[in-house]
Amino acid sequence: MMLSAKTKKTVGKLITYAVLVTGSLFCIVPLVWMVRSSLMTPVEIFMVPVKWVPDKLMWSNYKKVFEVLPFFTYYRNSLFIAALVVAGSMLTSSICAYGLARIKWKGRNVVFACIMASMMLPFAVTLIPTFLMWRAIGFTNSFVPLVAPAWFGGGAFYIFLLRQFYMTIPKDFDEAAYLDGANHFQIFTRIILPITKPSLAVVGLFTFMNTWNDFLGPLVYLNDEAKYTVALGLQLFTGSYRSEWHLMMAAACLVLIPVILVFIVGQRYLIEGITMSGVKG
């Protein structure tokens, strides 16, 4: 029996919704399990049948985490690094993208191709030579190797993202500004940047989340525990309290909270920026 076009469309939608709901559950259920475990006693976590709501909220688990390790110090270090990296990435990537999208110069496409090719290099490939370079100039066990790269290019992906958006802006704006006597700096700061706020917000959000969650970079460059980030602090905590799941889940929640808050605040800009950045290439 042949199905009508309307029936096929309905079945297709149901399958799509079922796949999306299933995928969402795979993402949400572990988070819910982590949060409820952080507020339970060790006995309640593995009770059968599974108990999703604790009899008593054990907020003392979070207090215990701060007592055994200096998480406030880790938070401060991570926020300091993230703030500098976000500022550097937004500034330098927007300047590079402007030069590649709005200014015509010989070799522009070649430079852009090289930038795109650099995205194919895994971080591990450049890790050892980069570490040797920073060690040779005496900047190991400091925040400089974690922050400085953001101020010298901002990242190939962010340059690509902003360039794509800059290319959607009509050239008429630039020409009108030229007729009024504006230079490239004035056009960039007074015309392009205000228009590109959504894409800049995307760069800021992605940079913050990547920097906050970065584990390998701090692991390689930081030796002093007083300079540890939250990612290293969580690893240190996990190694010391491997069997105390309620405390490990509380520590994981503490690491995750800033990322969730930043995403909630900036989700409107994230969706708008991604949508507008991929219109033209």
Image (spheres, rainbow, N blue to C red):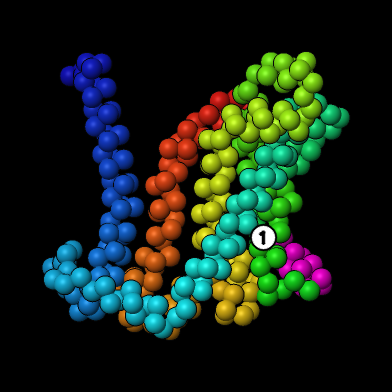
- Residue at 58 percent of width and 63 percent of height: 80
**Which quadrant of the view contains residue 210?**
bottom right
Q: Is residue 235 left or right of 116 when viewed as pictured?
A: left
Relative vertical location of residue 30 with respect to residue 103 in this rendering, above or below: below
Residue 151, horizontal then vertical, whole percent: 71, 52
Residue at the far right in the pictured view: 106
Point out the image quarter for the N terminus: top left
Task: Please tell me which residue lies in front, 269 or 22.
Answer: 269
Residue 154, horizontal then vertical, whole percent: 68, 48
Circle 1 crowding by C-alpha within 10 Å: few under 14, some 14–19, many from 20: many
Residue 241, horizontal then vertical, whole percent: 39, 82
Point out the image quarter for the C terminus: top right
Relative vertical location of residue 37 with respect to residue 204 in this rendering, above or below: below
Residue stretch rendered in magenta on the structure:
126-137
Residue 153, horizontal then vertical, whole percent: 72, 48
Assign a secondary structure to mark 1. helix
Relative vertical location of residue 126 with respect to residue 274 in this rendering, above or below: below
- Magenta-highlighted stretch: main secondary structure? helix
Residue at the far front in the pictured view: 180
Looking at the image, can residue 101 be seen? no
Residue that badge 1 annotates: 147
Is 121 in the magenta? no
